[in-house]
Image (tube, helix red, strand yellow):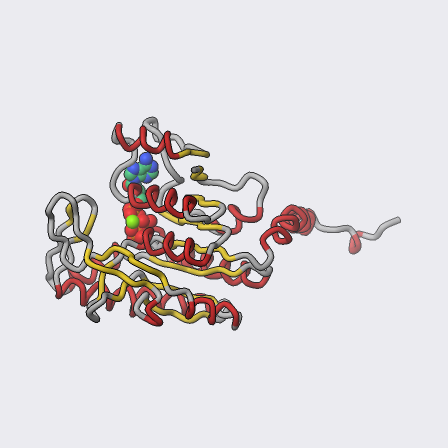
Amino acid sequence: MISDQTMPLPDSQEVAKVLTQALPYIQRFAGQICVVKYGGNAMTEEELKNSFARDVVLLKLVGMQPVVVHGGGPQIGACLKALNLGTEFINGIRVTDKRTMEVVEMVLGGKVNKEIVQLIQNNSGTAIGITGVDGQTIQAEKLESSDGIDYGYVGKVTGVNTKLITKLLNNNIIPVIAPVGSGPNGERFNINADTAASSIAAALQASKLLILTNTRGVLDKKMELIQRVNKQQVNDLIADGTISGGMLPKIECALNALHEGVKSVQIVDGRIPHALLLELFTEDGFGTQILP
Ligand SMILES: Nc1ncnc2c1ncn2[C@@H]1O[C@H](COP(=O)(O)OP(=O)(O)OP(=O)(O)O)[C@@H](O)[C@H]1O
Ligand SMILES: [Mg+2]
């Protein structure tokens, strides 16, 4: 007769099942680069941020090469407010004058970036935080809009230098990148974090770009989750106004990344604990997969 002590507990059975289910994914993803865009809007609760950091460390430990690119819109907004500086959005883009740019750079490169680095380190990972200025990782120029609006120091990406990121990856370090771009005349530009993440994913020829945000994924008119969406469907959803605001740059970047050779792009709900693990290592995955 088997004694009680040797009988596996139901909980441990469950853990074993989950680990077994993850095995083929771990094998498939070994050594591959996964760029994770962590949206400022998904960085709300402390516990969520910590579970994100733990997931990133776990990805590294099972052999993937995670690269984190983060946003920080709400954090920039809060700092501007504390400094009594107004801010204006036109077409979802923050008009960024010189003073605002100083705040953007401080908040993204100082506060948000170091917070993520610290959380990864608290979970025994090794991370180095940089902005796109370091190593000229993100090269940028002023965004000239077709509508004649002057957005100030809002930049568009003109190039990505992957040397520094590659050095970090080769040394088993998790790069954490703030979306600040370096201009041709030494000026710095505020770059949309989705754009920064997709440009970096494309330059690295990453196998995955995961965009963590504060919705379940791309939602249709009835607010239901769309599991897969291709370019043509995206165009229709934009034309009828279903996709708007912060989802616009996300979708555009997702399509660009696919076009430039990133193998898979997924928009997932960063408000769910362990969103990264669920997407990468379970059969169902979740969120919206963007197709060319
Ligand atoms: N069809 C849609 N489906 C889902 N979200 C949509 C859709 N259309 C517009 N949105 C908006 O896009 C938002 C996500 O973009 P947002 O820029 O706010 O977050 P983020 O990019 O994750 O954060 P950050 O800009 O700080 O990096 C959602 O909260 C939602 O309000
Ligand atoms: Mg956004």
Give the residue drawn at x 26%, y 59%. 75
Between 155 and 280, which is closer to the camera in this rendering? 155
Furthest residue to the right? 1
Q: How many marks?
A: 0
Give the residue drawn at x 43%, y 67%. 165
Residue 224 vertical position relative to residue 266 in the rendered view, above or below: above
Between 6 and 148, which is closer to the camera in this rendering? 148
Q: Which quarter of the picture shows residue 217?
A: top left
The C terminus: image quadrant: top left
Percent x, y of residue 95: 15, 54
Percent x, y of residue 264: 48, 45
Give the residue drawn at x 26%, y 30%. 239
Give the residue drawn at x 28%, y 64%. 108
Left or right of residue 44, residue 107 in this image: left
Residue 285 vertical position relative to residue 57 in the rendered view, above or below: above
Q: Is residue 40 in view from this perspective?
A: no
Between 205 and 268, which is closer to the camera in this rendering? 205
Percent x, y of residue 133: 30, 69
Q: Is residue 218 in view from this perspective?
A: yes
Percent x, y of residue 69: 38, 59
